[in-house]
Amino acid sequence: MIIRPYGDTLDDGAVQLSFTLPVPEGPRGREAARIFMEKLGFKHAEVVHSHAMAEGYSFYVAYAKTEIFVDYDAIHIEEATGEKVYSMNESCEVIREQLGRKVVIVGACTGFDAHTVGIDAIMNMKGYNHHYGLERYPEIEAHNLGAQVPNDKLIDYAVKVNADAILVSQIVTQKDVHIHNMTEFIELLQARNLRERFIVIAGGSRIGNKLAVELGYDAGFGKGSYADHVATFIIDRLIEKKQDY
Amino acid sequence: MIIRPYGDTLDDGAVQLSFTLPVPEGPRGREAARIFMEKLGFKHAEVVHSHAMAEGYSFYVAYAKTEIFVDYDAIHIEEATGEKVYSMNESCEVIREQLGRKVVIVGACTGFDAHTVGIDAIMNMKGYNHHYGLERYPEIEAHNLGAQVPNDKLIDYAVKVNADAILVSQIVTQKDVHIHNMTEFIELLQARNLRERFIVIAGGSRIGNKLAVELGYDAGFGKGSYADHVATFIIDRLIEKKQDY
Amino acid sequence: MDMKLNLSEAKIARARELAVAIVNPVMEFVEAHTSLTVERAALRLAGADGADADGVPVPNLVVDQLKGKLENGALLYYINALVKTGETVEGLNAKIAGGLRVDEIPLGDRGAIEKKTAERIQAFAERVKRNRAHREAKLVQYAGKNHSPMLYLIVATGNIFEDVKQAQAAAEQGADVVAVIRTTAQSLLDYVPYGATTEGFGGTYATQENFRIMRQALDEAVDKQGRYIYLTNYASGLCMPEIAAMGALERLDMMLNDSMYGILFRDINMYRTFVDQKFSRMINAFAGVIINTGEDNYLTTSDAVEKAYTVLASQFLNERFAYAAGMPARLMGLGHAFEMDPTIKNGFLMELAQAQMAREIFPEAPLKYMPPTKFMTGDIFKGVVQNALFNFVSQATNQGIHLLGMLTEAIHTPFMQDRSLALENAKYVMNNMADLSSEIQFKPGGIIMNRAHQVLDEAVAFLERIEQIGLMDAMEKGEFADIKRPRDMGKGLDGLVKKGDEYYNPFESFLKSELGLER
Amino acid sequence: MDMKLNLSEAKIARARELAVAIVNPVMEFVEAHTSLTVERAALRLAGADGADADGVPVPNLVVDQLKGKLENGALLYYINALVKTGETVEGLNAKIAGGLRVDEIPLGDRGAIEKKTAERIQAFAERVKRNRAHREAKLVQYAGKNHSPMLYLIVATGNIFEDVKQAQAAAEQGADVVAVIRTTAQSLLDYVPYGATTEGFGGTYATQENFRIMRQALDEAVDKQGRYIYLTNYASGLCMPEIAAMGALERLDMMLNDSMYGILFRDINMYRTFVDQKFSRMINAFAGVIINTGEDNYLTTSDAVEKAYTVLASQFLNERFAYAAGMPARLMGLGHAFEMDPTIKNGFLMELAQAQMAREIFPEAPLKYMPPTKFMTGDIFKGVVQNALFNFVSQATNQGIHLLGMLTEAIHTPFMQDRSLALENAKYVMNNMADLSSEIQFKPGGIIMNRAHQVLDEAVAFLERIEQIGLMDAMEKGEFADIKRPRDMGKGLDGLVKKGDEYYNPFESFLKSELGLER
Ligand code: B12
Ligand code: B12
Ligand SMILES: Cc1ncc(COP(=O)(O)O)c(C=O)c1O
Ligand SMILES: Cc1ncc(COP(=O)(O)O)c(C=O)c1O
């Protein structure tokens, strides 16, 4: 199925845009904005508003229409977890039945990142949005190391407690600092020959499964994820691993 | 000079977008939105928000970055009037000195369009935003025919009062009704062999000089235009015409 | 309701007295006249429908045949034809569409005609009463599910089938009221197009079939969402009463319907308009349809600070005209609008004052509050803020019908996402400050109180002036919206007919008696 | 100012008494101690500056040399070196950067040292007084040109030169205050980097050179815009007093500076923090710098309804700590925040109550009001509405310093256009309802009044609990923000030093006497 943005008629391809141009406000800037949109592949591009922001900078609001489309059927999405997500009780049951031991999970907000609310949402007792965190899972031993944990400290700790999985939270993304930090973490693991020993999971508001897998993680979780998702992924992966041996 | 949109760093190419897709909300819709933006030529495209609107329709907010640029130096804009716009007094003086007779202008909101505020802003005594309208110009005889004037009635009237210029206002643009209507007007003039007899000017919030000229008008005026601009254009054109003979 | 503004009861009463004095002479004229569209409306109520091969509607065909002999009404001939041909209404309509001239059928037995008329009246009354009962039952079934104020959204694609999708989406997202905006200039057509339509500009044709299609679509949504959804259209323009008739038959719930809008803003002749509005309002009143009056329109051309009193004065007149048509206050969606220049210091305070004033003066009316339009620009982000303040004032003053402001008001008729964002804005703001109104009081002698007192004073003074010269003279002189409308000019004057001694319109009599207007 | 909430004077007085009782024991500890950064700050005030080839700042080099013998302060050795080498401060700084060890220079004549110290104090005092005089003159010159509340914008590109562009743009668009946000985790560095910097994450390094560059850029804007523009940075973290010193020298106008923030939110040792905050506040007070306290941070992790009282309690403590450092109320930008879940019915009323409460309890303080952050989402259109309501509350309750909410709060550090839209939103809303505050009264016993009374009651009860166990024990027990901080843990404890009997810090004495803290 071919799809296009929808304004008020199917396939009209209508999109709203806003942006700044580093030029003074005026007819020439507006025309530059229009041409820019044409170069993006818009057919009817209309600058509906502009204002001067500062010397040499101007702001534009535009509505435009395009014939560019997406083939919806061809879209593959690989989320870390599928349709089926275990509840806390289900998770613990599966652990008891299939693994027969406690699962150890270590997590932290790494590098200089101090945004602990996200990792706390996943790990702390009280959880988030009516989803309990991993600490409350009777069959999971969860260690939340908190904020600003250096990558090597996190690995040391995971080795010490013999963790099954390591959770890395990264919220600050300016200048791709999260990418650098997440990459460093994997490199450190590899350098110490520990990559295969752990299930390694990243999370954060701007992180998706795709990005995380590209960077060498087993999975990634973004906005709207809960302990349930993380537990499901880890347990299933542990069962798989067990079967591989 | 090559320019790109500016978020917080020169040439970062940052743009905000929002649009609707005719698919349900969810990871697949978000991925479709992302791919759509990539096809538009964005490099880092991030869907920062989505919500379901109705069965099978979802809304997306995104920020994306592109390397697409515009060559600012190559941009030509042709506004109807240049830097120099006559004030009311200047206009009248030029008319007195160079033309030596009253200039007759007829205007209307044509077709089924009843948005008279715009044409009134240009023509009525009191004007708009501290710019008097043409009716107040001592050297101009202005006839404002008001709303919903059929194209042929407007032409008849212009012939009757021996107008120098005809002003056409078009505000409703849904389904390009303004284009049809403006085109019809020019065709009617041509059919009656009157096109050369009048200076013909279009105006409206979504009308620019470019569009109007393309449709066969002498000039077009959009948002932010005043009687001053219109008078300037007409007077200069009349002087030109006079010199041509 | 808290009375916070300390408005003078005496002045309010005085304004109402003046409205009576202004409207009464107009109603005398109205009583003595009918119009083409009033006749066509009566025909429609009796069952006339359909169109000929050229799209000319059957009611028009009938009335056109009777040109010159309409002083006694069109109904007589139509009913006579029914009796004489022995057809059902459908059968007769088809014949008329095929060329049958009812004016050429000799008038038959009066008794048979009256009996037939009584049947048609009964059929009409039953249908409308069934509609009312249905609406009322759903309102009871889903009591408490509508927002307060009711959230009102428009659809305006030009294509009824596209409109349906948009309307259902709006319902799914929380709309209480869906209005199908009419195509440009339908108000100037002296007929109502027939059938489903897909080609309109800035809106969709109002046709009975479009009404039916949309009603059905919204009825599905009603049960799906568990919330009654009001359907709105325009009983306005040269076919005002006919559209009211169609709305009554198809269970519309609201109608834009103003006693003077057409005169001022569409240059429709004033006699014609006054006659048409009365009959349309009787139909609306009988059908339990809430009218939305058009005071907001004053402020799209004049200034909301300077001319606020014209809005209030018009509300008093619309109220009076509505009472004169037998309409109860709870159906009077008197209009006003948030159209103050956003650059005005303390503009918000004045707006709050005016909205609260309207609330206190018309405590039972489901006031219709219009969003910012004229000062909306292409800056959609600023537009969102303008709409947020509008939502705030509306909730803070307990308005009845809240038209949602669109962030793209200055750009295009609404996209689906524009509506979604409008609802999100309103629902958030209104819930977040739900009970503010009962929490705050205004400082005596402050900006807010003074503003309300001033507008009321100005409105009384204005009504006094109108009362002295008479409403029609006042409109000729441009007292309203600075627009001068000579009484013998304007569209549709030739469709005005002085009632003859034998004028026959039992639907009118029936409505009058149902509405308690019969002396 | 109108008092609208009918808050109990007695309870407010009781809270202040409790704050005194809580803070006094802490101040006794503080008086007896110094820290590495207090010493480095004193060195900076005396003129120490620059860095060695590895980027280690001269004040750190000096203090590192003196490790183990700091109980009498670092200043003595630095001034002694000045005297003994006969160098200017610049000359000496260069030598130290080159490897000179001041600890190895035998202490010379006490009189000469004291004379030199007096010279340095005078140089410092003159510079700071010149800064104050400049600021005050500009404020007089451009009196009435700042908005009220002051509109506060952040820049955070990481690159000081890019920041300058953004800051000037912000100024051009109407900002009254520009804050340069600090790079992540600078608070945990036990030194202040040197020179201009272009690489930060989520913010830009606070360095004296960056301060200077930005001050100069904003000074240009000041005269261009005809409006004084306040420059803000962070006197916070392990180098709190040093940054205060730099700010005093470079004429910053505001500093984020909290008495407990570092302990709770950066796990800095509590002894260290209490010592550092005192010296930093004396410097700020002397330099006329408004502090911004960090109560908003409580609400980024705890709930704004449940934990509102922790904000108020912390304001009382910050106020007390500030008085104890000689700071007048007009420099206390006590913090609070609009962080209520937007889905709460009547959340706006509670927010209005809390903001008004803070206003009435701290009438002279230029309250710093933070925008919604935690409940901002990627839905920028909803974000605009959240910010509009925030702007509304801020103006309606006469806040002092208004941090502008960004529609992209949940997405990225602000783009230039985000700031522009934020200013547009605030200016529109605040002007449109400018005088609402003096127009409205609150219903006695209503939601708003009750909410304010409840929060005050809870804060008093909380302070009572703290007073009983003592502030340090309370922090160990997790009474604040549910965060437990053992007194012997946390960063920077090893930088705490008990003052010796010979402790020499004439800058401290000078500040005390200037601030009236000398008994
Ligand atoms: C609260 C907050 C803070 C608090 C943090 C308190 C704390 N203890 O966490 C304080 C005030 C300390 C703070 C400071 C800063 N912040 Co901050 N902060 C926020 C804010 C407002 C909310 C974040 C939040 O708590 N979200 C709620 C949680 C539940 O969502 P979440 O983190 O996305 O987590 C969910 C998922 O992502 C996922 N998840 C997250 N981690 C993980 C990990 C795993 C393994 C898994 C499976 C899932 C997972 O699950 C969670 C639940 O669904 C955001 C703006 C916003 N509205 O988003 C800015 C924001 C994140 N902060 C920002 C910045 C820049 C900073 C500072 C750097 C500013 C400065 N220079 O001082 C500092 C630096 C702190 C540091 N060293 O990191 C920026 C980041 C910009 C960017 N994209 O790079 C933001 C976006 C604000 C902005 N627009 O500038 N901040
Ligand atoms: C006021 C208004 C009305 C009033 C008009 C009153 C009147 N007497 O003019 C009323 C209520 C009657 C009205 C009705 C309708 N309206 Co209307 N209306 C507006 C509104 C709110 C403001 C327009 C306005 O007055 N702007 C101020 C003037 C000064 O600006 P301007 O027209 O752009 O004029 C300036 C320039 O463009 C230029 N200019 C204009 N004309 C000319 C001519 C010449 C020769 C020159 C040189 C210059 C010039 O100079 C002017 C001064 O700078 C706009 C929304 C908005 N905020 O823009 C919608 C809007 C224009 N309306 C709209 C619609 C759809 C309608 C209706 C069709 C709705 C309906 N189905 O009933 C009806 C139809 C009326 C009709 N038959 O045309 C749409 C148009 C959508 C589109 N792009 O097609 C808009 C954009 C609203 C929306 N989002 O849906 N409307
Ligand atoms: C009462 C009333 N009728 C009708 C309309 C619609 O105008 P038109 O005459 O174009 O149908 C309006 C304006 O919105 C109105 O307020
Ligand atoms: C008082 C105070 N200091 C400092 C900061 C900044 O934090 P950091 O410790 O990351 O510099 C904040 C938070 O914005 C704060 O409120």
Image (spheres, coloured by chain):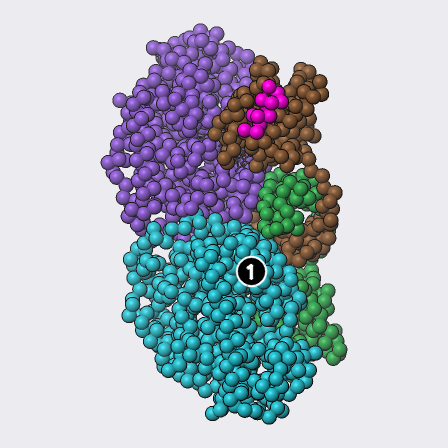
Chain colours: A green, B brown, C purple, D cyan
Name the residue tied to disc 1.
Answer: D219
**Residue pictured at 72% horizontal, 76% vertical:** A188
Decide if residue A138 is on the left or right side of residue D96.
left
C377 or D136: which is nearer to us? D136
**Residue pictured at 32% horizontal, 55% vertical:** D442
Region rendered in magenta: B89-100
Element at label 1 = helix
Q: Position of residue C419 (x, y in %)?
A: 53, 44
Vertically, is D28 above or below A224? below
Chain of the residue displaying label 1: D
| Kind of residue at disc 1 | Asp
Is D18 magenta? The answer is no
**Residue pictured at 35% horizontal, 73% vertical:** D16
Using the rendered image of the protein, determine whether residue D479 is visible from the camera's viewpoint: no
Decide if residue A169 is on the left or right side of residue C137.
right
Q: Position of residue C354 (x, y in %)?
A: 36, 41
Q: Position of residue B55 (x, y in %)?
A: 58, 47
B120 or C129: which is nearer to us? B120
Q: Position of residue D360 (x, y in %)?
A: 35, 63
| Main secondary structure of the magenta stretch | helix
Judge the density around disc 1: few (<14), some (14-19), many (≥20) Cα neighbours within 10 Å.
some
Vertically, is C346 above or below A158? above
Q: Give residue A167's quadrant in the image.
A: bottom right
A208 or A57: which is nearer to us? A57
**Residue pictured at 55% horizontal, 60% vertical:** D219
The quadrant of the picture occupied by the C terminus of chain C is top left
